[in-house]
Image (cartoon, rainbow, N blue to C red):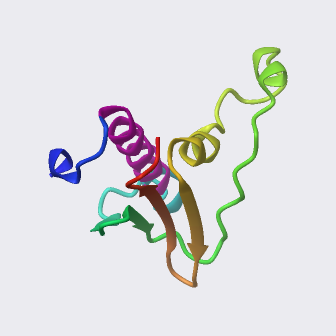
């Protein structure tokens, strides 16, 4: 379980938050909130890193790249207050890789064991 990952508390909390956000994105955007469509979460642990892969059934439409939100535009109501997910996820982990194929989207989150 999470306690066995041997990460400092702050890094573990960031990883858990990133996994939760990526999973919610997979359910909402990839699987279109269809309760009967699964999201796969795969954890890999090595001596140097922890990798979590979140895969949805979203099809061939690629996931957009993480964009830095325009805080002023969001606060002024010129943009939706949503749209922070990938940006925040990317800031919480050491590496984020996004791939898509004909039937799935996968977001891989990597936290290095020796990070801060």
Residue 56 at what x, y percent from top left? 44, 67
Foreground of the two, 6 or 18: 6
Residue 67 at what x, y percent from top left? 75, 46
Looking at the image, which residue sits at the far top? 76
- Picture layout, residue 10 above or below residue 39: above
- Residue at 64%, 43% in the rendered image: 87
In screen coordinates, is 116 left or right of 85?
Answer: left
The picture quadrant where one finds residue 68 is top right
In screen coordinates, is 15 left or right of 28?
Answer: left
- Residue at 75%, 35% in the rendered image: 69
The picture quadrant where one finds residue 40 is bottom left
Magenta region, main secondary structure: helix
Looking at the image, which residue sits at the far front? 114
Looking at the image, which residue sits at the far bottom? 102
- Picture layout, residue 108 above or below residue 19: below
Stretch of the chain drawn in magenta: 9-26
- Residue at 51%, 81% in the rendered image: 103
Residue 54 at what x, y percent from top left? 41, 63
Does the stretch in magenta take in 28? no
The picture quadrant where one finds residue 89 is top right
Does the stretch in magenta take in 25? yes
- Residue at 15%, 52% in the rendered image: 1
How many marks on residues? 0
Foreground of the two, 49 or 25: 49
Residue 115 at what x, y percent from top left? 46, 48
């Amino acid at each position: 379980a999470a306690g066995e990952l041997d990460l400092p508390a702050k890094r573990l909390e960031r990883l858990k938050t990133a996994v939760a956000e990526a999973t919610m994105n997979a359910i909402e955007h990839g699987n279109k909130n269809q309760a009967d469509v699964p999201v796969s979460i795969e954890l890999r642990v090595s001596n140097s890193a922890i990798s979590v892969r979140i895969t949805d059934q979203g099809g061939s439409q690629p996931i957009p790249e993480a964009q830095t939100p325009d805080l002023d535009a969001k606060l002024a109501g010129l943009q939706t207050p949503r749209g922070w997910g990938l940006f925040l996820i990317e800031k919480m982990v050491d590496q984020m890789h996004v791939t898509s194929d004909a039937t799935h989207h996968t977001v891989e989150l990597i936290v290095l064991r020796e990070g801060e």
